[in-house]
Image (cartoon, rainbow, N blue to C red):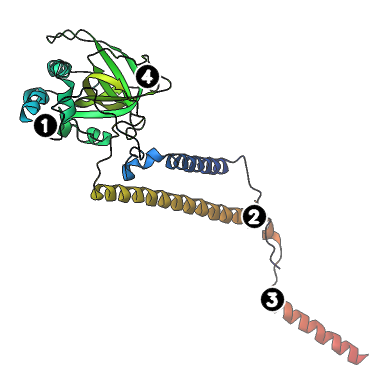
């Protein structure tokens, strides 16, 4: 009966086994990260939009009651607020810091935000969603937007020599519900009143700002030296919100855009499943190959075994049975003679 070779023990110190375990640990880590991200409500704002104020909460009105703050601003107000086209054409997105040709428009827009009545800006301000400012900055450049969020940094900012009489400047980092971990970078011409200052404001202070969207700016994060993009807003002042909500920017996605996001998400999930199946198939193929090689090694003859059989005398089976028959016949004859 043919014997089955003993199963080879698992080599836990082998490179192949260790690579397999590392792959499984990495896959488990990715799953845990995905679960953590999915548990955060802000991860789904791209699909549902950020939550608005709860029932019964009132939106804080603008600080300056002004007769021009009406649903439809007059042509005079719009003309006063509008930025000249030649200034907008000189602005370039995705640069770290200002280019030399942007210095003039930068200071002129700051001066306009400083000098205009706040009611003018309030009357034309829109609640533009954070993702739209990053995706289509050229469409919203020079428009007046309102930002309501959490103030986490407020510091004096260096000011270049200019012809607009701007002698001091402040920068605020404001995070909103739809901006996630990326802030609005807001430059202010008026010193902040009644607000804490510093590199890290804890706890964050709810604030509201109305100003001009200047560009999609880039900055270097000190922690990892990576370049990030953020909207730059040029404004006159920043004010504390007392209602806890203010004007919440909403994600202005259409049904088509949401469908595109959903299809993209399904594609990512399908790709992950396909990679997992491919990885499993490769692992199982490796196991089967390892088993075949182990069986082959277990059943293979040792070195020199074949050569040792060369000196053994072999007998033809037919000749062996013929000799056996002859011996039996001779034995019967001898018994009959006796």
Where residue 188 appears, x then y in whole percent?
24, 17
Where residue 143 appears, x then y in whole percent?
16, 29
Where residue 20 appears, x then y in whole percent?
53, 44
Q: What separation in Å lies between label 4 and label 2 (alpha carbons)?
A: 60 Å
Q: What separation in Å lies between label 4 and label 3 (alpha carbons)?
A: 88 Å
**Earlier sequence position, callout 1 versus callout 2:** 1
Q: Residue furthest right?
A: 338
Reading the image, the residue beneath label 4 is: 222
Secondary structure of the residue carrying numbered label 2: helix
**Earlier sequence position, callout 4 versus callout 3:** 4
Which mark, residue 298?
Answer: 2
Q: What separation in Å lies between label 1 and label 2 (alpha carbons)?
A: 89 Å
Q: Residue at x 67, y 58 (%)?
A: 5
Which mark, residue 317?
Answer: 3
Q: Nearer the viewer, mark 1 or mark 2?
A: 1
Instruction: Confirm or deny contact between disc 4 and disc 3 (CB under 8 A).
Output: no
Where residue 331 appears, x then y in whole percent?
85, 85
Instruction: Confirm or deny contact between disc 3 and disc 2 (CB under 8 A).
Output: no
Q: Nearer the viewer, mark 1 or mark 3?
A: 1
**In what quadrant of the picture does the N terminus appear?**
bottom right
Q: Residues within 10 Å of mark 2 (few under 14, many from 20)?
A: some
Reading the image, the residue beneath label 1 is: 73
Q: Nearer the viewer, mark 4 or mark 2?
A: 4
Q: Residue at x 16, y 29 (%)?
A: 69
Residue 100, can we see it? no
Residue 63, quarter of picture: top left
**Earlier sequence position, callout 4 versus callout 1:** 1
Q: Residues within 10 Å of mark 1 (few under 14, many from 20)?
A: some
Q: Nearer the viewer, mark 4 or mark 1?
A: 1
Q: What separation in Å lies between label 1 and label 3 (alpha carbons)?
A: 114 Å
**Earlier sequence position, callout 1 versus callout 3:** 1
């Amino acid at each position: 009966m043919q014997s089955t070779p003993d199963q080879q023990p698992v080599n836990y110190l082998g490179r192949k086994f260790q690579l397999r375990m590392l792959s499984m640990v990495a896959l488990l880590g990715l799953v845990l990260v995905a679960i953590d991200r999915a548990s955060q409500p802000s991860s789904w704002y791209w699909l549902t939009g950020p939550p608005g104020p709860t029932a019964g909460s009132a939106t804080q009105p603008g600080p300056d009651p002004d007769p021009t703050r009406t649903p439809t601003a007059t042509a005079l107000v719009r003309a006063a607020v509008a930025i000249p086209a030649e200034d907008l054409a000189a602005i370039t997105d995705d640069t770290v810091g200002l280019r030399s040709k942007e210095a003039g428009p930068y200071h002129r827009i700051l001066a306009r935000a400083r000098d205009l009545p706040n009611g003018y800006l309030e009357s034309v301000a829109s609640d533009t969603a954070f993702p739209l400012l990053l995706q289509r900055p050229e469409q919203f450049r020079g428009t007046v937007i309102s930002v309501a969020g959490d103030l986490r940094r407020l510091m004096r900012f260096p000011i270049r020599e200019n012809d607009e009489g701007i002698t001091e400047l402040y920068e605020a980092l404001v995070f909103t519900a739809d901006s996630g971990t990326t802030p609005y970078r807001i430059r202010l011409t008026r010193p902040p009143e009644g607000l804490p200052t510093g590199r890290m404001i804890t706890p964050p202070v709810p604030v509201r700002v109305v100003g001009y969207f200047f560009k999609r700016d880039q900055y270097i994060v000190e922690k990892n030296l990576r370049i990030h993009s953020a909207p730059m807003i040029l404004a006159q002042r920043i004010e504390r919100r007392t209602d806890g909500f203010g004007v919440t920017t909403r994600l202005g996605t259409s049904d088509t855009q949401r469908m595109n996001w959903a299809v993209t998400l399904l594609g990512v999930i399908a790709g992950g499943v396909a990679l997992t199946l491919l990885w499993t198939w490769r692992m199982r193929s490796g196991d089967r190959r390892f088993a075949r090689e182990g069986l082959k090694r277990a059943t293979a003859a040792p070195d020199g075994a074949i050569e040792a059989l060369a000196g053994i005398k072999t007998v033809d089976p037919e000749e062996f049975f013929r000799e056996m028959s002859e011996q039996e016949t001779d034995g019967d004859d001898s018994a009959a003679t006796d």
